[in-house]
Amino acid sequence: MESNEKKRILSMYQCTGTFTLGNYLGAFKNALRFQEEGYQCAYALADLHAITVRQEPAQLRKYTQDAYAFLLAMGIDLSKTLFFIQSHVPQHAQLAWILNCYTQFGELSRMTQFKDKSAKHADNINAGLFTYPCLMAADILLYQADFVPVGADQKQHVEIARDIAERFNGIYSPTFTVPEPIIPQHGARVMSLQDPTRKMSKSDGNNNGCISVLDDPDTIMRKFKRAITDSEACVRYSDDKPGVKNLMEIYSCITGKSMEEIEGEFAGKGYGDFKPAVAEAVIGELRPIQERFKEILQDKDYLQRCCRENAEKAGSIAQRTVSKAMKKIGFLPMK
Ligand code: AQP
């Protein structure tokens, strides 16, 4: 079997709010798995992407710092993994401009995220919202990533990055690794506790539907106790029971138990037993991370050093790619 060692994985997370249990179970646990499986992982906080929607400056700074500290607390190991903040590495914006000129208006018009976000923020349909796939392509191509983990609904982003890379490579000569999307085998798509037909989201207006990774135990318990279920009062895994299905998936993701095992564990019991058990599992999972998070936040020097050193390392990898692309295009080198 081919070793993972030389394969690079790139993943970026938006720091537009406090991370949710959905981010944690759907993305971060896999990020740790990739790190342990020997991939060369590059993870980043996508703060340049965040400003396609208006952000309050002090909030954005806080969310970014908290997000960095949270991922370190969770177990991102800087001796194995590159972890940086996108705006600290100017090559992202630089390559994004270049890639803008190799991307067609029609391709960008077809992106579903543009359609969704422009409908949601009709008062601020800015050019960044339209061209963000070029920035995303730059994020991926700068690091010559082989794989980009995505949810099933995000494959379109990697596909456009592949198209741009192939186009550029075709016009000049091989310059960018053409990335492949991978849909991780583990992890759940976590749905809102108040509307299990919608995904749990940082920007959800209904705070009760969303578990923040920094929620205290009482809040987590309260939100799970109020979670929408159904009137059957039976812990059974079925598409007809989206609320219960969601809770079972969360429980399974944390405990490692199969759906049959969970059904067995709660046979003859109602939601009054099941919901607090799910809450306890989540509280137990998050507690040590929250404690470490608070310690890391106390040590601002350490945090700043980690951010700076990682941005420098990322910058030197990114610069090699930008220089290569600029040379192919015909920009006169500065001697
Ligand atoms: N509910 C979810 N279930 C499983 N995975 C999820 N992810 C997000 N929500 C869920 C995954 O988390 C990673 C990082 O996502 P992101 O922060 O870049 O942005 P997002 O997907 O847009 O997350 P939000 O919380 O829904 O943000 P807002 O509210 O700002 O739009 C991704 O891998 C994503 O799949």
Image (tube, helix red, strand yellow):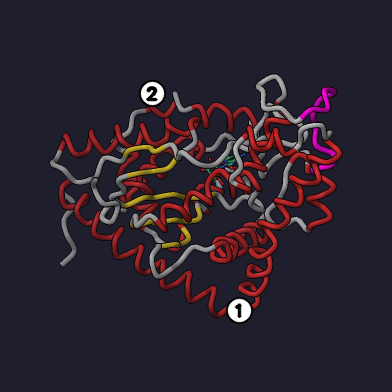
Disc marking residue 299 = 1
**Towards the viewer: 295 or 169:** 295
In the displayed structure image, the side of residue 112 where residue 311 appears, left or right: left
Which amino acid is tagged 2? Answer: Gly
Q: Is mark 1 within 8 Å of ligand 1?
A: no
Above or below, 282 against 260 in this view is below
Which amino acid is tagged 1? Answer: Asp
Which residue carries the number 2 mark? Answer: 106
| Quarter of the image that includes the N terminus | top left
* Residue 147, position as x, y percentages in the image: 34, 44
Q: Is mark 2 within 8 Å of ligand 1?
A: no
Magenta-drawn stretch contains 228? yes
Q: Main secondary structure of the magenta part?
A: loop
In the displayed structure image, the side of residue 66 where residue 143 appears, left or right: left
**Towards the viewer: 307 or 31:** 31
Q: Which residues are magenta?
A: 224-234
